[in-house]
Amino acid sequence: MIAILSDIHSNTAALSAVLDDIREQRIRTIWCLGDILGYGPNPRECLAMIRDNCAEVILGNHDYAVLYEPTYFNAGAESAAFWTRQMLCDESVPEESGDLLRFLATLENRKTIANPVEGVREVLLVHGSPRRPVNEYLFPEDTTNHPAKIQSSFDRMEHLCFVGHTHMPGVFCEDLMFHPAAALPEGIFELNDKRHIVNVGSVGQPRDRDNRACYVILEDHQVRFRRVKYDVETTADAIRNIESLDNYLADRLVEGR
C-alpha cells in the first residue's frame, strides 16, 4: 500500500493527524504531490515532516512561489507566500533554514513510477495536471465546460495519474466523467486497464465542504479515499494570530471551502 497526499498548506495539525492515520494502517511508503507551503501558520514544521516521511515529493505552485515569485496569486495568497519565505529564511536558525530551502529547491515538477502496485502499470505524479504539472487546475466541471483540457491531460499519461491543486477529491475517467470521492461507496474506486486521473484532495485546506483532512491509499487494483478529523480550530486560531495571514484563510479552513 502507498499513501498519497497533497496540499498540506503549512497545517501541522492536519498533517500530524494524517501521518498518524497512515502509521496505524502500517503503510510505509508515502508520496506527496506538493503545496506543502502557503496559507497556513507552520511552514517550517510541515516542510521538515514531509522531507522526513515521504519517499517522493513533487513541487506545488505555492512551493514554487516561496522559492521564486507568487505569480498570479491573489492578495492573501501572495502575502502568505512572502511571510512563509521570511519564516524559512529565519536567521536565528540558519543551518535548519538552509537544509529546508535546499530540500525545497531539489523538488521536481513530475515523477513517473512503473508498476508501483499490482494492476497499475505506470503512475504519473504531478501537482496540477499532466499537461501543466505545477499550475493547471483540473476542475470537476471541466469535464463538461472544457472537455478538450481534460482530454489533453489524458493524452499525456500512460495509465494512472495523481494530482492535487484544486483540493477537490475524486476521479476523472477516460469517458470524461468525474466521480466525487464522497459519492464512492466506502471511498473506494476500482482500477482497470483504462486511464484515470485521481485528485487526492487536500490535507491542510479541504474545499469540498468537509473540513476533515483528505488523502488516498493506492492498493492493488484500487484507490481508497480517507478522511481524518483533526483540531481545525487550533490551526484557524494560529492563522488569525499572524498579521501577515488573512483571517479569511482561517474561516475557509473551518468551513471546508
Image (cartoon, rainbow, N blue to C red):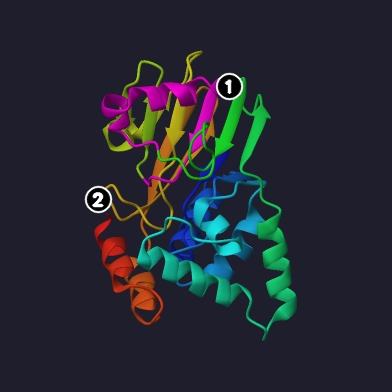
* Residue at the image point whose x is 31% and y is 31% from the top: 142
Image location of residue 220, percent across then percent down: 55, 25
* Residue 133 position by quadrant: top right
Instruction: Please provide the residue range marked out in magenta.
Output: 138-167
User: Which quarter of the rendered picture does the N terminus lie within?
Assistant: top right
* Residue at the image point whose x is 43% and y is 66% from the top: 78
Q: Is residue 85 left or right of residue 183?
A: right
Observer-nearest of 72 and 179? 72
Q: Is residue 125 left or right of residue 248?
A: right
Would you say residue 147 sits in the magenta stretch? yes
Q: Determine which residue is flagged by label 1.
A: 120
How far separated are the C-alphas under marks 2 and 1? 31 Å
Mark 1: which secondary structure? loop
User: Badge 1, how many Cα within 10 Å: few under 14, some, many 20+?
Assistant: many
Q: Determine which residue is flagged by label 2.
A: 209
Quick check: 139 above or below 191? below
Would you say residue 140 sits in the magenta stretch? yes
Observer-nearest of 89 and 3? 89
Q: Is residue 40 visible?
A: no
In primary-sequence order, the first of circles 2 and 1 is 1
* Residue 110 position by quadrant: top right
Q: Which amino acid does label 1 sit on?
A: Val
Image location of residue 127, percent across then percent down: 52, 43
Quick check: 240 above or below 163? below
